[in-house]
Amino acid sequence: MKKAVQRAVVGAAILAVASASYLAYDFGMVRFNHPSIKDYPIQGIDVSHHQGDIDWKKLAAQLNVRFAIMKATEGGDHKDRRFARNWQAAKEAGIVRGAYHFFTFCRPGREQAQNVMATVPKEQGTLPIAIDLEFVGNCDKVPTVEQLTAEVNAFLAEIKSAYPEKPIFYVTQEFFDRYLKGNESSFPDHYLWLRSLFKEPEQEKCGRWSIWQFADNGKIDGIEGPVDLNALCPTETGLAALFAETAGR
């Protein structure tokens, strides 16, 4: 009985420490994994309507906001209500822009592509279209590898004429391991944008990934509340050329 009580006390203590650590991270008091500007000189944010009104001029004055990837669309008909405003304001502030589409497994890829093409302007000097692939949202369908491959390929085939650049795939480590790992040849060539909040991504440093989302609770002047933080792989030459004009900021 005594040992059982001791184990219960130890278990409760571990749970309390873990909960406190998570809450500290969630409120931005603890930073597990923020890479330095010296090691990752090109950093940026991703935003949606959840960030509310954004002061883009304030953002542009900060070294860790060289780019902003903003939500444009979701599924076959949803459009982020702040996308058009954010897209224009970021341009005026001189921040390199990109748009992302939240991919749902409950709508055909071709329909979703048409939503993107009706929403995202075709402009030079912007990041390629990013596709957010993850297990969240209002669709509870879990596709097979074959189903996902078919719909993502249909999506990319539809948008290729409008956005011919190599796309960006945003994935969690879980999603990568389940669908992309070992199946890369089933998908068109793409840049990899990996979410990894507690350590640097495992894909051979940054030899296999291009953008690393390292925090979802960042604090940035110009945005009230938390924001996602990202870093460009220092050896990523395909996207780095977009930042040549802003290198002196």
Image (tube, rainbow, N blue to C red):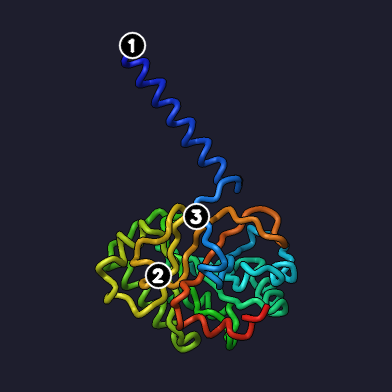
Residue that numbered label 3 is attached to: 33
Looking at this rendering, what residue extends furthest in the top direction?
A: 1
Task: Give the residue at x 60% y 45%.
Answer: 29
Instruction: Give percent across and percent down for residue 207.
Output: 37, 73
Q: Is residue 168 above or below residue 20?
A: below
Task: Give the residue at x 39% y 26%.
Answer: 11
Instruction: Give percent across and percent down for residue 217.
Output: 58, 53
Q: How crowded is mark 2: few (under 14 residues within 10 Å), some or many (20 or more)?
A: some
Looking at this rendering, what residue extends furthest in the left direction?
A: 182
- Residues at discs 3 and 1 in contact (Cβ within 8 Å): no
N-term-proximal mark, 1 vs 2? 1
Residue that numbered label 2 is attached to: 206
Q: Which residue type does callout 3 highlight? A: Asn
**Measured Cα–Cα span from mark 3 to mark 1:** 40 Å
Q: How crowded is mark 3: few (under 14 residues within 10 Å), some or many (20 or more)?
A: few
Residue that numbered label 1 is attached to: 2
